[in-house]
Amino acid sequence: MLDLTRSAGASALLLFFALSSPLLSDDSVTVTPPIPAMAADQAEAAPLTATQPVAEQPPSVPPARAELTPSPIAIDRPALPALTPTNPGPPEQAIPPLARQVPEPDTARQLPPQDPGAPVAPLPRADARLQEARLHTGLSWDYCGPRPGTDGLGIVDPPASTNAIPIDITADRVDYDQNTDLIQLQGGIEFVQNERRLEAERSAFNRRTGQVDAAGSIYLDYPGLRLTGDSIQYNLETKAGTIDHARYRVSGNANLRGEADRAWMLSEQLSRYQDILYTTCPPGYSDWSLQARELELDQASGLGVARHARIRFFDVPVLYTPYLQFPIDGRRRSGFLIPTFGSSDETGTDIRLPYYWNIAPNMDATLTPRYMSTRGLMLGAQFRHLASFQELEINGELLPSDQKMPDNGARSALRVEQRGQLGERWSTSVDYAAVSDDQYLEDFGNGLDVTSLRNLTRRGDLRYAGDGWRLLTRFQEFQTVDSSIAPANRPYGQLPHLEFALDPQRWKQLVEYSFTGQYDYFDHNAAVHGNRLVAVPTVRIPLRRSFGYLIPRARLYSTSYDLVDQTPGLPEQPSHLIPSLDIDGTLIFERETDWFGAATLQTLEPRLYYVLTPYEDQSQTPRFDTTALDFSFASLFRPNRFTGYDRIGDENRLTVGLTSRTLASHDGDELFRASLGQIYYFDDRRVQLDGDAVDNDLSSLMAGEVAARLLKDWTALVSAQWNPNQTDHPWEKQALQLRYTPGDDRLLNLAYRFNFGEQEDEQYEDTDISFQMPVGGNVKLVGRWLYSLLNEETVEAFAGIEFGRCCWRLRVLGQHLKRSAENAGSTSIMLQLELAGLGSFGNQIEKRLERGIYGYQPN
């Protein structure tokens, strides 16, 4: 019986390997012994499949095998390194000249009888539109470029034992010449193996030389990849071949397409292409494309070399280089990254040209020369190190001479971030930031990405996690960059801070006990400083039921000091021992109801919280890390009205709170919540941050919160504080927020906030509007306006437009930013072009939008 499964299997796989070797690899192919010649009447019979019986097979000969190994490629590479332009150099092997023979178009594409010993004759080129349509039939294009969150193309690897899977072959005509050992297939050829399919109009396989030729509407369908072409030649022995007029489409974890005039397979690892095009735009749109006259892909080195490469945007060249070397896999390599351009009042024209240095597989650096027309040349650097025990990142900037402020000398900035894990129990973290002068961040921007523009943190932590207990060793100090803060009012350093914490432990399944201990040496150059020791043991009895809970708790605050530069007449070693008792109780009542026709569950949750702490005079101790708690609904249920341990407030108070919630019955979502609470005092409060004043109010401010889903896409949040003891301005603090989030990239935030408290430096009254709104299908408007009603000035405002399709985005943003009350503010313009699957050019606008627009989601 004749087995065409083996003999024609090479033809089925050669197209897959010839063009797509950089993306895919071929499969194990077994070539069977020669096939006897068939009579003419047999050859012209009905279409033959691999399962039909044929003439008896002659004695076998040793089979020839071609072992090929799959090699998947990751397309979602790290952001570093990017494309690396270098000096042009001669190719290792010149691209063979094109020698296609394309016949003139004829009236009909017929299949004339063919001499079994002759090679496959060229056929007229297939209709390009039909071939392009076949690439995309039945495939969606719901995203452009790599699918977010993936690290590969998603092309399915062939099974490990593909040679055991039969190949079904269908053709209108089969001829075999035993003298030349040549198999000819003609008309409607289909090779089907599992999920792979190859179609052609003619195919020839020379058993002696291993040469396989196919022509006429070549079509390959492979999971994750489709290819079309006019003709293909491939040799199974030399692993070399060519394919003409190739088109490709990648799907699955990436959507991309392109074409090449001719492709050469020089070896299993080396391929070359002529007149190649690549894009991630949907079919019918070629808004941008990467084109190269010649392209070489070397899988052994993981490098691609393009000659005369051009990036075109709407047929307008935006980048050209005669020689372009870039990575084709995840291996990182040194080279220049895409430059960024910008302009602002502070820096003038701003150009950055990063260079990536791949030091080692787990270590790299990026050097960024930055030219500012009004300031001069700055050098920035980033160093990264990744090991099994730590992650380390160092960022630095240096401006040797500031043309705008020449008397300031060299200006610089440094940021060090580290996170480490030493075994299962030890861990480390470092966050160190420093600038050369107070105006640095205002002049050159927050390139360090620090969270505060007033005090830069310098902190190092060493942690140990025991069985039910934790130990922290910390060294921390601050650099104050706000010149308006007096030296005596600047924060203390903790050199060191030692903290021991015992996690809550159960005793007799009823009582819980815990412990917190701290030792600090508070350092300061312009104020009293010294040692502080704190110990706080705690015992509580949590009684929890389905209808509520009752938790009585007792704790003991023990603090002692050893001070330096204490105010004359005050003790240098004060100490305090202050007990405290609190009881927290809540009941939960429920009922079933409806919310605008939807089944819901409504709760009513009254809560009582009582605190009793005796008075202890602490006016003679300094305030190292203690401030007053920001008053809010949550602060009503805290045992101490101060932060830290330098002030333990005397308390004899009862908090009465009430919360009601409306929950959706089908999914538990909160549709409505209203909370209201107030503190009632039974004694005067004598412990204050400073001074001997006594607070004798009988009740606190009334704090409330209301959150509601007004409509399907509208939510509202209101928090307010009402002072019943004030008649002029009873509403001391309010925040009103309204959000519109219908989806489809539409977003609107409206907010009004004010604070008319007693401390003048904390007073504000602001309006805040931010939005993200599509206009049509390809245009999006973004913006924010933060306005101070109290100072009658704009604090921050930016407006931008974003337009494009899923394969590209162009963003233009104008911004005005006022960093301090004394600063006049600065204006800047930013531009960013993002090409899906290739990279972005210009400023990183997305990060700025994420910080400025609450809920902003980039595409």
Image (spheres, rainbow, N blue to C red):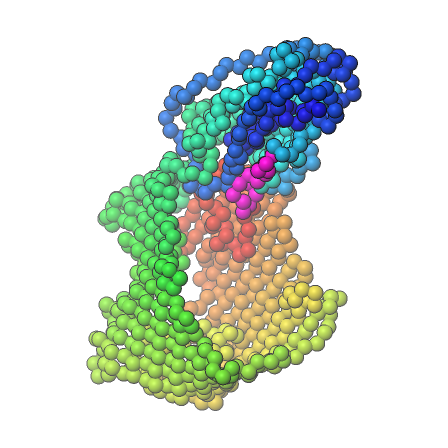
In percent of the image, x 30 and y 41: which residue is there?
A: 376
Is 479 part of what is drawn in magenta?
no
Task: Measuring from the top left, give residue 268's x and y in whole percent.
Answer: 49, 27
Total numbered labels placed on residues in the image: 0
In percent of the image, x 50 and y 21: which residue is there?
A: 238
Is residue 728 at all visible to an observer of this figure? Answer: no
Task: Measuring from the top left, give residue 177's x and y in whole percent.
Answer: 66, 13
Quadrant of image for the N terminus: top right
Question: Residue 293 or 625: which is nearer the viewer?
Answer: 293
In percent of the image, x 21 and y 75: which residue is there?
A: 565
Task: Measuring from the top left, give residue 704's x and y in whole percent.
Answer: 56, 74
Is residue 192 at all visible to an observer of this figure? Answer: yes
Principal secondary structure, stretch drawn in magenta? loop
Lateral position of residue 396 relative to residue 542, left or right? left
Is 153 part of what is drawn in magenta?
yes
In percent of the image, x 31 and y 74: which residue is there?
A: 519
Query: Residue 668's quadrant in the figure?
Result: bottom right
Question: Residue 697 or 309: which is nearer the viewer?
Answer: 309
In the image, residue 736 sits, relative to residue 747, either above or below, namely below
The residue segment tinted magenta is 144-162
Question: Residue 350 or 170: which is nearer the viewer?
Answer: 170
Query: Residue 778's quadrant in the figure?
Result: top right
Lateral position of residue 598 relative to residue 579, left or right? right
Lateral position of residue 375 relative to residue 42, left or right? left
In the image, residue 819 sits, relative to residue 570, either above or below, namely above
In the image, residue 716 sits, relative to residue 156, either above or below, namely below
Question: Residue 109 or 763: which is nearer the viewer?
Answer: 109
